[in-house]
Image (cartoon, grey):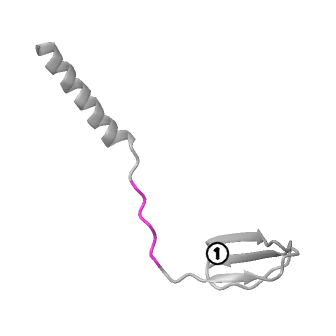
């Protein structure tokens, strides 16, 4: 019985050490500022003006084979 209690205690301590030392902490989301979706018209490698920092970019193709791109800033 004493060996079983010692084994349980060692196992519990190993789990606690693993949780404290080896598990990453959760990341906090950044501030919820105002974001806007800006349609991108120039798709041929040119530049386009945007204010702020671009945090996302996506392009989709419609059923009529037109490409629509937008930036999130």
Q: Residue furthest left?
A: 2
Q: Mark 1 falls on what kind of element?
A: loop
Left or right: residue 50 versus residue 48 is: left
Q: How far from the left and from the top, in percent, is residue 42?
A: 83, 81
Q: How far from the left and from the top, in percent, is residue 67?
A: 82, 74
Examine the rendered structure and indicate whether residue 11 appears above or below residue 19: above
Residue annotated with mark 1 = 54
Residue displayed at 21% across by 19% down: 7
Q: In the picture, which quadrant includes the C terminus?
A: bottom right
Q: Which residues are magenta?
A: 26-32
Name the main secondary structure of what is drawn in magenta. loop
Examine the rendered structure and indicate whether residue 15 appears above or below residue 40: above
Closer to us: 54 or 60: 60
Q: How far from the left and from the top, in percent, is residue 35?
A: 56, 81
Q: Is residue 69 magenta?
A: no
Q: Residue furthest front?
A: 63
Residue 31 placement: quadrant: bottom left
Residue displayed at 61% across by 72% down: 55
Closer to us: 46 or 40: 40
Examine the rendered structure and indicate whether residue 41 appears above or below residue 23: below
Q: How far from the left and from the top, in percent, is residue 21?
A: 34, 40
Residue 52 placement: quadrant: bottom right
Q: Residues within 10 Å of mark 1 (few under 14, many from 20)?
A: some
Residue displayed at 33% across by 36% down: 18
């Amino acid at each position: 019985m004493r060996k079983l209690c010692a084994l349980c205690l060692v196992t519990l301590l190993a789990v606690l050490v693993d949780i404290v030392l080896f598990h990453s902490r959760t990341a906090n989301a950044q501030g919820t500022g105002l974001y806007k979706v800006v349609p991108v018209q120039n798709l041929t490698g040119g530049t386009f003006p945007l204010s702020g920092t671009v945090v996302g970019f996506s392009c989709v193709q419609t059923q009529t084979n037109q490409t629509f791109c937008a930036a999130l800033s």
